Amino acid sequence: MSVAYDPNKQGWTAAAVTTVATLGLLFTAYTIHKNTYRHPRDPMNFQVYHAEDNAKHSASAPAAEAKH
């Protein structure tokens, strides 16, 4: 004979796998965020982006003047 149908015993494996995968992805996102985030007022952040902006503007300025 077959076992009686019990809907409360089905799907727990899929729910557990989904929960573990979700927790793994959250941990990965948190780790990446903590390792790469820089606050906008961080002095190193200002130095890096300020230098990049100056390099972009100084490289594009002669090209813009040559078109006129």
Image: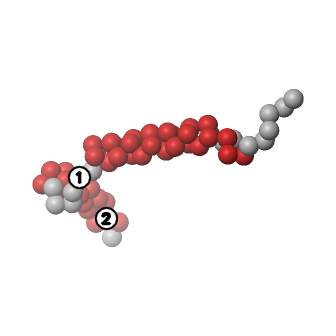
Q: Is residue 58 visible?
A: no
| Residue sitting nearer the eye, 35 or 10 | 10
| Residue sitting nearer the eye, 67 or 52 | 52
Taking the image as shown, residue 61 lies to the left or right of residue 7, namely: left
Residue 35 point in image, percent of width and height: 27, 43
Q: Is residue 41 above or below residue 4?
A: below
Disc 1 residue crowd, few under 14, some 14–19, many 20+, Cα 10 Å: few
Residue hosting label 1 = 38
The secondary element bearing badge 2 is classed as helix
Residue 22 point in image, percent of width and height: 49, 44
Identify the amino acid type marked 1.
Arg
Disc 2 residue crowd, few under 14, some 14–19, many 20+, Cα 10 Å: few
Kindly check if marks 1 and 2 are in contact, taking CB atoms under 8 A apart as contact: no
Image quadrant in which you'd find residue 58: bottom left
Residue at the spot 31% in from the left edge and 64% down from the top edge? 64
Taking the image as shown, residue 12 lies to the left or right of residue 59, namely: right
Real-space Cα separation, disc 1 to disc 2, in angstroms: 33 Å
Residue 39 point in image, percent of width and height: 21, 57
Disc nearest the viewer among 1 and 2: 1
| Residue sitting nearer the eye, 25 or 11 | 11
Residue hosting label 2 = 64
Identify the amino acid type marked 2.
Ala
Residue at the spot 67% in from the left edge and 41% down from the top edge? 9
Question: Which numbered disc covers residue 54?
Answer: none
Q: Is residue 34 above or below residue 41?
A: above
Q: Quadrant of the N terminus?
A: top right
